[in-house]
Image (spheres, rainbow, N blue to C red):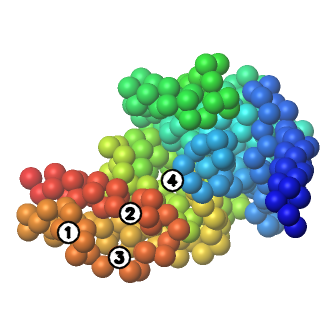
Amino acid sequence: MNTQHWMMYLFLAFLLALVTARAHAVQTPYGESDVPFTLHRVPGTQVYYVLGQSGVPGADNQGHTSNAGFVVTARGVVVYDALGTPALGYRLLQAIRSVTDRPVSIVVAGHYHADHVYGLQAFREHTQAVIWAQRRCVDYLDGPVGRARLAQRREALFPWVDEKTYLVRPDKTFAKRHEFDMGDTHLELVYVGPAHAPDDTMMIVREAGVVFSGDLIYGGRLPFLGGDEVNTRNWLAGLKHLGAIKPAPRFIIPGHGQPADDAAAAIGFTRGYIEYLRTQMGKAAQDLTGFAQAYARTDWSRYRDVPTFKAANRKNAYHVYLEMEAESF
Protein backbone atom coordinates (compact mmCIF):
# COMPACT_ATOMS: atom_id res chain seq x y z
CA MET A 1 0.00 0.00 0.00
CA ASN A 2 1.56 3.31 -1.08
CA THR A 3 1.51 6.49 1.00
CA GLN A 4 -1.48 7.98 -0.84
CA HIS A 5 -3.58 4.87 -0.35
CA TRP A 6 -2.51 4.66 3.30
CA MET A 7 -3.57 8.25 3.97
CA MET A 8 -6.93 7.62 2.25
CA TYR A 9 -7.42 4.51 4.38
CA LEU A 10 -6.76 6.47 7.58
CA PHE A 11 -9.14 9.21 6.49
CA LEU A 12 -11.93 6.74 5.73
CA ALA A 13 -11.33 4.97 9.04
CA PHE A 14 -11.62 8.31 10.83
CA LEU A 15 -14.88 9.10 9.03
CA LEU A 16 -16.27 5.67 9.89
CA ALA A 17 -15.38 6.12 13.56
CA LEU A 18 -16.94 9.58 13.55
CA VAL A 19 -20.16 8.36 11.90
CA THR A 20 -20.35 5.40 14.30
CA ALA A 21 -19.89 7.68 17.32
CA ARG A 22 -22.56 10.06 16.02
CA ALA A 23 -24.92 7.15 15.43
CA HIS A 24 -24.58 6.18 19.08
CA ALA A 25 -24.83 9.73 20.38
CA VAL A 26 -27.68 10.24 22.84
CA GLN A 27 -29.60 13.51 22.71
CA THR A 28 -30.27 15.09 26.09
CA PRO A 29 -31.50 18.54 27.18
CA TYR A 30 -27.86 19.16 28.12
CA GLY A 31 -26.31 18.30 24.77
CA GLU A 32 -25.17 15.11 23.07
CA SER A 33 -23.51 12.32 25.00
CA ASP A 34 -21.86 9.36 23.26
CA VAL A 35 -19.75 7.92 26.05
CA PRO A 36 -20.45 4.19 26.64
CA PHE A 37 -23.23 3.80 29.19
CA THR A 38 -24.36 0.29 30.14
CA LEU A 39 -27.01 -0.60 32.69
CA HIS A 40 -26.33 -3.64 34.90
CA ARG A 41 -28.66 -5.51 37.24
CA VAL A 42 -27.75 -7.24 40.49
CA PRO A 43 -29.01 -10.79 39.83
CA GLY A 44 -32.28 -11.68 41.52
CA THR A 45 -32.99 -8.11 42.67
CA GLN A 46 -34.52 -4.84 41.53
CA VAL A 47 -31.17 -3.09 42.04
CA TYR A 48 -29.45 -1.61 38.97
CA TYR A 49 -26.20 0.26 38.44
CA VAL A 50 -23.92 1.89 35.87
CA LEU A 51 -20.13 1.89 36.01
CA GLY A 52 -17.89 4.85 35.23
CA GLN A 53 -14.62 4.66 33.37
CA SER A 54 -11.24 4.83 35.05
CA GLY A 55 -9.19 7.99 34.90
CA VAL A 56 -9.59 11.69 35.60
CA PRO A 57 -12.77 13.38 34.32
CA GLY A 58 -12.03 14.88 30.91
CA ALA A 59 -13.11 15.09 27.28
CA ASP A 60 -12.16 11.47 26.59
CA ASN A 61 -14.68 10.11 29.13
CA GLN A 62 -17.05 13.13 29.16
CA GLY A 63 -16.93 13.11 32.97
CA HIS A 64 -18.22 9.54 33.27
CA THR A 65 -15.82 8.25 35.94
CA SER A 66 -18.08 7.43 38.89
CA ASN A 67 -20.71 4.77 39.53
CA ALA A 68 -24.38 5.27 40.32
CA GLY A 69 -27.46 3.09 40.68
CA PHE A 70 -31.08 2.79 41.64
CA VAL A 71 -33.60 0.52 43.33
CA VAL A 72 -37.09 -0.08 41.96
CA THR A 73 -39.56 -0.36 44.86
CA ALA A 74 -43.31 -0.51 45.38
CA ARG A 75 -43.32 3.20 46.28
CA GLY A 76 -41.09 4.47 43.54
CA VAL A 77 -37.48 4.52 42.46
CA VAL A 78 -34.66 5.39 44.85
CA VAL A 79 -31.48 6.62 43.15
CA TYR A 80 -28.01 6.61 44.69
CA ASP A 81 -25.65 9.21 43.22
CA ALA A 82 -26.26 11.10 39.98
CA LEU A 83 -22.95 11.04 38.03
CA GLY A 84 -20.65 13.82 36.92
CA THR A 85 -22.55 15.94 34.38
CA PRO A 86 -26.19 16.94 33.80
CA ALA A 87 -26.16 14.94 30.55
CA LEU A 88 -25.01 11.81 32.39
CA GLY A 89 -27.66 12.37 35.05
CA TYR A 90 -30.26 12.56 32.29
CA ARG A 91 -28.94 9.34 30.75
CA LEU A 92 -29.30 7.69 34.15
CA LEU A 93 -32.90 8.91 34.20
CA GLN A 94 -33.38 7.44 30.71
CA ALA A 95 -31.95 4.13 31.97
CA ILE A 96 -34.48 4.17 34.80
CA ARG A 97 -37.28 4.77 32.30
CA SER A 98 -36.08 1.77 30.26
CA VAL A 99 -36.77 -0.42 33.31
CA THR A 100 -39.85 1.06 34.97
CA ASP A 101 -42.41 3.82 34.67
CA ARG A 102 -42.65 4.22 38.45
CA PRO A 103 -41.79 7.74 39.61
CA VAL A 104 -38.36 8.63 40.88
CA SER A 105 -39.20 9.35 44.51
CA ILE A 106 -35.82 9.82 46.19
CA VAL A 107 -32.31 10.69 45.06
CA VAL A 108 -29.48 10.19 47.56
CA ALA A 109 -26.24 12.13 47.17
CA GLY A 110 -23.61 9.74 48.51
CA HIS A 111 -21.25 12.69 48.98
CA TYR A 112 -20.81 16.08 47.39
CA HIS A 113 -17.86 15.75 45.05
CA ALA A 114 -17.98 16.99 41.47
CA ASP A 115 -17.77 13.58 39.82
CA HIS A 116 -20.94 12.45 41.63
CA VAL A 117 -23.28 15.43 41.88
CA TYR A 118 -23.62 17.53 38.71
CA GLY A 119 -26.10 14.95 37.42
CA LEU A 120 -28.47 16.03 40.21
CA GLN A 121 -29.45 18.91 37.95
CA ALA A 122 -31.26 16.49 35.61
CA PHE A 123 -33.26 14.99 38.48
CA ARG A 124 -34.11 18.42 39.89
CA GLU A 125 -35.36 19.65 36.52
CA HIS A 126 -37.06 16.50 35.18
CA THR A 127 -38.50 14.69 38.22
CA GLN A 128 -40.35 15.44 41.44
CA ALA A 129 -37.81 13.47 43.48
CA VAL A 130 -36.75 14.57 46.96
CA ILE A 131 -32.96 14.90 47.11
CA TRP A 132 -31.34 13.67 50.33
CA ALA A 133 -27.80 14.15 51.64
CA GLN A 134 -25.88 14.09 54.89
CA ARG A 135 -25.98 17.51 56.54
CA ARG A 136 -22.24 18.16 56.18
CA CYS A 137 -22.74 18.53 52.43
CA VAL A 138 -22.87 22.25 53.21
CA ASP A 139 -19.09 22.13 53.71
CA TYR A 140 -18.87 21.67 49.94
CA LEU A 141 -21.88 23.70 48.87
CA ASP A 142 -21.09 26.79 50.93
CA GLY A 143 -17.30 26.57 50.87
CA PRO A 144 -14.69 27.60 48.29
CA VAL A 145 -13.97 24.04 47.11
CA GLY A 146 -17.34 23.51 45.45
CA ARG A 147 -17.19 26.82 43.58
CA ALA A 148 -13.59 26.28 42.51
CA ARG A 149 -14.30 22.76 41.27
CA LEU A 150 -17.30 23.92 39.24
CA ALA A 151 -15.15 26.58 37.56
CA GLN A 152 -12.49 23.96 36.80
CA ARG A 153 -15.02 21.50 35.40
CA ARG A 154 -16.56 24.19 33.16
CA GLU A 155 -13.20 24.28 31.41
CA ALA A 156 -12.14 20.63 31.62
CA LEU A 157 -15.57 19.18 30.74
CA PHE A 158 -16.99 21.77 28.36
CA PRO A 159 -19.57 21.47 26.80
CA TRP A 160 -20.92 18.80 29.19
CA VAL A 161 -20.39 21.18 32.11
CA ASP A 162 -20.96 24.80 31.14
CA GLU A 163 -22.28 28.12 32.42
CA LYS A 164 -25.76 26.61 32.80
CA THR A 165 -24.51 23.86 35.12
CA TYR A 166 -25.11 24.54 38.79
CA LEU A 167 -24.79 22.85 42.17
CA VAL A 168 -28.06 21.39 43.38
CA ARG A 169 -28.77 21.64 47.09
CA PRO A 170 -30.53 18.76 48.84
CA ASP A 171 -34.17 19.11 49.85
CA LYS A 172 -33.59 17.18 53.08
CA THR A 173 -30.58 16.20 55.17
CA PHE A 174 -29.89 13.72 57.94
CA ALA A 175 -27.29 13.44 60.70
CA LYS A 176 -26.29 9.85 61.53
CA ARG A 177 -28.91 7.50 60.07
CA HIS A 178 -32.13 7.64 58.13
CA GLU A 179 -34.43 4.87 56.93
CA PHE A 180 -36.87 4.74 54.02
CA ASP A 181 -39.83 2.35 54.10
CA MET A 182 -40.60 1.83 50.43
CA GLY A 183 -43.25 -0.84 50.95
CA ASP A 184 -41.50 -3.96 49.74
CA THR A 185 -38.03 -2.54 50.35
CA HIS A 186 -36.29 -0.99 53.35
CA LEU A 187 -33.31 1.24 52.77
CA GLU A 188 -30.97 2.74 55.33
CA LEU A 189 -28.63 5.69 54.95
CA VAL A 190 -25.61 5.56 57.26
CA TYR A 191 -23.15 8.40 57.76
CA VAL A 192 -19.59 7.05 57.63
CA GLY A 193 -17.64 10.30 57.36
CA PRO A 194 -15.75 12.38 57.38
CA ALA A 195 -13.57 9.88 55.51
CA HIS A 196 -13.16 10.44 51.77
CA ALA A 197 -15.40 13.50 52.11
CA PRO A 198 -17.09 15.32 55.00
CA ASP A 199 -20.51 13.85 54.15
CA ASP A 200 -19.75 10.22 53.15
CA THR A 201 -22.99 8.21 53.12
CA MET A 202 -23.59 4.56 52.29
CA MET A 203 -26.98 3.13 51.44
CA ILE A 204 -28.03 -0.36 52.55
CA VAL A 205 -30.73 -2.16 50.56
CA ARG A 206 -31.82 -4.69 53.19
CA GLU A 207 -33.94 -7.21 51.29
CA ALA A 208 -31.49 -7.38 48.39
CA GLY A 209 -28.36 -7.60 50.54
CA VAL A 210 -26.80 -4.79 48.51
CA VAL A 211 -24.75 -1.85 49.75
CA PHE A 212 -23.94 1.29 47.80
CA SER A 213 -20.68 2.15 49.57
CA GLY A 214 -19.89 5.44 47.86
CA ASP A 215 -16.19 6.26 47.79
CA LEU A 216 -15.56 4.31 50.97
CA ILE A 217 -14.71 1.44 48.57
CA TYR A 218 -12.94 1.64 45.21
CA GLY A 219 -13.42 -1.60 43.30
CA GLY A 220 -10.19 -3.03 41.92
CA ARG A 221 -8.19 0.16 42.35
CA LEU A 222 -6.53 2.22 45.03
CA PRO A 223 -8.76 4.76 46.79
CA PHE A 224 -8.08 8.46 46.44
CA LEU A 225 -6.69 9.80 49.72
CA GLY A 226 -5.09 13.01 48.48
CA GLY A 227 -7.73 15.60 49.36
CA ASP A 228 -7.54 17.94 52.32
CA GLU A 229 -10.89 16.57 53.54
CA VAL A 230 -9.66 12.97 53.80
CA ASN A 231 -9.55 11.44 57.29
CA THR A 232 -8.10 7.93 57.14
CA ARG A 233 -8.79 7.17 60.82
CA ASN A 234 -12.50 7.76 60.25
CA TRP A 235 -12.28 5.94 56.94
CA LEU A 236 -11.13 2.81 58.77
CA ALA A 237 -13.99 3.23 61.24
CA GLY A 238 -16.42 3.43 58.32
CA LEU A 239 -15.00 0.25 56.81
CA LYS A 240 -15.36 -1.45 60.18
CA HIS A 241 -19.01 -0.44 60.25
CA LEU A 242 -19.50 -1.74 56.71
CA GLY A 243 -17.92 -5.04 57.69
CA ALA A 244 -20.18 -5.36 60.73
CA ILE A 245 -23.47 -5.22 58.79
CA LYS A 246 -25.62 -8.26 59.57
CA PRO A 247 -26.40 -10.19 57.53
CA ALA A 248 -23.25 -9.49 55.55
CA PRO A 249 -23.86 -7.79 52.19
CA ARG A 250 -23.82 -10.13 49.26
CA PHE A 251 -23.03 -7.35 46.80
CA ILE A 252 -21.18 -4.03 47.15
CA ILE A 253 -21.47 -1.31 44.53
CA PRO A 254 -18.53 1.06 45.08
CA GLY A 255 -18.26 4.72 44.15
CA HIS A 256 -15.66 3.84 41.50
CA GLY A 257 -14.53 0.60 39.92
CA GLN A 258 -16.02 -2.85 39.73
CA PRO A 259 -18.69 -4.16 42.12
CA ALA A 260 -17.87 -7.01 44.49
CA ASP A 261 -19.79 -10.14 45.41
CA ASP A 262 -17.22 -10.84 48.14
CA ALA A 263 -17.79 -8.08 50.67
CA ALA A 264 -15.05 -9.22 53.03
CA ALA A 265 -12.44 -9.18 50.26
CA ALA A 266 -13.48 -5.74 48.99
CA ILE A 267 -13.44 -4.25 52.47
CA GLY A 268 -10.22 -6.03 53.37
CA PHE A 269 -8.32 -4.69 50.37
CA THR A 270 -9.18 -1.06 51.04
CA ARG A 271 -8.69 -1.43 54.79
CA GLY A 272 -5.34 -3.19 54.33
CA TYR A 273 -4.07 -0.46 52.02
CA ILE A 274 -5.01 2.36 54.37
CA GLU A 275 -3.60 0.52 57.38
CA TYR A 276 -0.34 -0.10 55.51
CA LEU A 277 -0.03 3.58 54.64
CA ARG A 278 -0.73 4.64 58.20
CA THR A 279 1.82 2.15 59.58
CA GLN A 280 4.61 3.03 57.15
CA MET A 281 4.08 6.78 57.05
CA GLY A 282 3.31 6.90 60.77
CA LYS A 283 6.66 5.30 61.60
CA ALA A 284 8.45 7.72 59.29
CA ALA A 285 6.74 10.72 60.87
CA GLN A 286 7.55 9.46 64.36
CA ASP A 287 11.20 8.93 63.43
CA LEU A 288 11.35 12.37 61.78
CA THR A 289 12.24 10.76 58.46
CA GLY A 290 11.50 13.03 55.49
CA PHE A 291 8.68 11.99 53.19
CA ALA A 292 10.79 11.45 50.05
CA GLN A 293 13.14 9.14 51.92
CA ALA A 294 10.28 7.32 53.63
CA TYR A 295 8.46 6.80 50.34
CA ALA A 296 11.58 5.46 48.62
CA ARG A 297 12.23 3.01 51.45
CA THR A 298 8.70 1.61 51.59
CA ASP A 299 7.98 -1.72 49.92
CA TRP A 300 5.10 -1.06 47.52
CA SER A 301 5.25 -4.43 45.76
CA ARG A 302 1.83 -5.61 46.91
CA TYR A 303 0.14 -2.57 45.34
CA ARG A 304 2.41 -1.71 42.39
CA ASP A 305 0.31 -3.62 39.84
CA VAL A 306 -3.01 -2.11 40.89
CA PRO A 307 -4.21 0.03 37.94
CA THR A 308 -4.26 3.38 39.76
CA PHE A 309 -0.94 2.93 41.59
CA LYS A 310 1.03 5.43 39.48
CA ALA A 311 -1.72 8.02 39.51
CA ALA A 312 -2.66 7.84 43.19
CA ASN A 313 -0.16 6.12 45.46
CA ARG A 314 2.44 8.85 46.01
CA LYS A 315 -0.23 11.50 46.64
CA ASN A 316 -1.99 9.11 49.00
CA ALA A 317 1.19 8.39 50.91
CA TYR A 318 2.03 12.08 51.22
CA HIS A 319 -1.41 12.93 52.59
CA VAL A 320 -1.19 10.13 55.14
CA TYR A 321 2.33 11.22 56.08
CA LEU A 322 1.02 14.71 56.89
CA GLU A 323 -1.98 13.23 58.66
CA MET A 324 0.21 11.02 60.84
CA GLU A 325 2.47 13.97 61.63
CA ALA A 326 -0.57 15.92 62.85
CA GLU A 327 -1.82 12.97 64.88
CA SER A 328 1.53 12.69 66.68
CA PHE A 329 1.14 16.11 68.27
Expressed as whole percent of the image width and height from the top left, the position of residue 222 reads 47, 64
Mark 1 — residue? 294
> In the drawing, what numbered circle is on residue 45?
none
Amino acid type for the residue under numbered disc 1: Ala
First in sequence: mark 1 vs mark 4: 4
Disc 2 or 3, which lies upstream in sequence?
A: 3
Residue 126: x, y in percent?
A: 78, 25
* Residue depicted at x 36% and y 66%: 274
127 to 225, vertically: above or below: above
The crowding category of the residue bearing disc 4, from other C-alpha atoms within 10 Å (few below 14, some 14 to 19, many at least 20), is many
Dot 3: element: loop
Amino acid type assigned to the residue bearing label 2 in the image: Asn
Cα distance in 3D space between marks 2 and 1: 13 Å
Say which label, 3 or 4, has the lower sequence index.
4
Is residue 267 visible to us here? yes
Which residue was labeled with disc 4?
Answer: 215
Kindly tell me whether residue 182 is visible in this rendering: no
Q: Is residue 126 left or right of residue 112?
A: right
Amino acid type of the residue that numbered disc 3 sits on in the rendered structure: Trp
For label 2, the residue is 313
Q: Earlier in the sequence, mark 3 or mark 1?
A: 1
| Residue at image mark 3 | 300
Q: Is residue 217 above or below residue 82?
A: below
- Dot 3 and dot 1 residues touching (CB under 8 Å): no
Q: Which amino acid type corresponds to the residue marked 4 in the rendered image? A: Asp
Q: Residues within 10 Å of mark 1 (few under 14, many from 20)?
A: many
Q: CA distance from mark 2 to mark 3?
A: 9 Å
